[in-house]
Image (cartoon, rainbow, N blue to C red):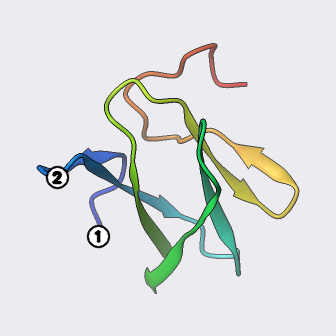
Amino acid sequence: MTAWGPRPGPDGTTRFVLWAPDADVVMLEVEGTAPVAMTATGDGWMAAEAHAPPGTRYRFRIGDTEVPDPASRRQSGGVH
């Protein structure tokens, strides 16, 4: 099993991981930056890294659907 949820790194980037086994394309959308395509890492897991210090707002996009991170430690504005 892959550890999921945002994982801050020492260089200021954060690694985001999402389990989306039926998705071909998942985008990471970090507030104030261009969307980042997530990479399949096996067994339905997708991953991406972005500059996003703790407290930065972000979400995932699967097709036309915006998805909050089910593993986030805090969701500004709630789950919607």
Residue at screen point 16% across, 52% down:
11
Callout 2 touching callout 1 (CB < 8 Å): no
Q: Name the residue carrying label 2.
A: 11
In the foreground, 51 or 8: 51
Q: Tell me the element at label 1.
A: loop
Q: How many marks?
A: 2
When the figure is inspected, residue 47 is found, relative to residue 40, above or below; the finding is: above
Question: Which mark, residue 41?
Answer: none
Q: Amino acid at mark 1?
A: Met
Position of 17 with respect to 35 (left or right) is left
Q: Name the residue carrying label 1.
A: 1
Residue at screen point 43% across, 41% down:
71
Where residue 33 sits in the image (x, y, percent)?
59, 46
Label 1 Cα neighbours within 10 Å, binned few <14 / some 14-19 / many ≥20: few
Residue at screen point 64% across, 54% down:
34
In the foreground, 21 or 49: 49
Position of 13 with respect to 9 (left or right) is right
Where residue 42 sits in the image (x, y, percent)?
43, 86
- For the C terminus, give its image quadrant: top right
Position of 73 with respect to 59 (left or right) is left
Q: Tell me the element at label 2.
A: loop
- N-terminal-most mark, 2 or 1: 1
